[in-house]
Image: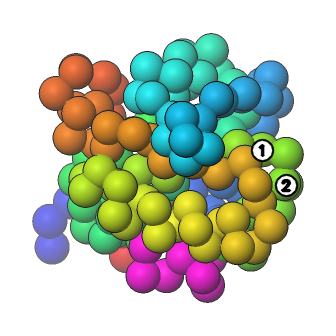
Amino acid sequence: PPAPLGPPPPDLDHLVLNPDGPRASFTARDDRFVPGADVLAALEAHQQFILLDARAPSDWAAAHLPGAAPFPFYDATQLVSHITDPDVWVIAYCACPHGASGHVVDAVRAAGHTRAAILDEGIGWWIQQGHPTERGSVP
């Protein structure tokens, strides 16, 4: 079989990036969209937040934002129980750029987490800007 592309996804009980870092604070446009520059700044500052890739796991394996967990839109309602801290920001992205990530954000908010938003430009923009990405492997 081919060699794995990279490390497996993070365990769903450990979704928070930089758990010992300062908490990220985002200002969402229209209470829904966060600019990619703000997400990049939070990553570079090692701030605490959750980053969810709403695409299929195979897309996550090919390229994803650093530290992002695969959280496909079609499994969102089953997975939101793993987001346990309502004060930690949740940022979701996809390639649409708002379709699948919007579904994930809606599911996260429906579970009571108000600090959830969409990476406004999506992963296509992220890659075009030359921002860092990672590869991963999925079972």
Q: Residue 79, position in %: x, y?
A: 62, 76
Disc 2 residue type (three-letter): Asp
Q: What are the residue bounds of the magenta stretch?
A: 73-79
Q: Which residue is mark 2?
A: 85
**Dot 1 and dot 2 residues touching (CB under 8 Å):** yes
Magenta highlight on residue 75: yes
For image coordinates 69% across by 65% down, the residue present is 109
Question: Could you say which is closer to the camera, residue 78 or residue 2?
Answer: 78
Q: Which mark is residue 88?
A: 1
Q: Which mark is residue 116?
A: none
The answer to whether 127 appears left or right of 138 in the picture is left
Q: Secondary structure at mark 2?
A: loop
Name the residue: 33% across, 26% down.
132
Mark 2: few, some, or many residues within 10 Å (few <14, many ≥20)?
A: few
Colour basis: rainbow
Up-down relation of residue 74 to residue 135 (above or below): below
Q: Is residue 58 left or right of residue 7?
A: left
Q: Quadrant of the N terminus?
A: bottom left
Q: Is residue 122 left or right of residue 92?
A: left
Report the quarter where the C terminus lies.
Answer: bottom left
Front-lying residue, 102 or 22: 102
Task: Locate residue 102, reporting x and y percent.
Answer: 45, 62
Name the residue located 77 percent from the left edge and 37 percent from the top edge.
19
Could you say where residue 64 lies in the image, as x and y percent from the top left? 34, 46
Depth check: 18 or 72 in front? 72
Taking the magenta stretch, the answer to whether it contains residue 91 is no
Q: Main secondary structure of the magenta part?
A: helix
Q: Is residue 25 above or below residue 82?
A: above
Q: Amino acid at mark 1?
A: Val
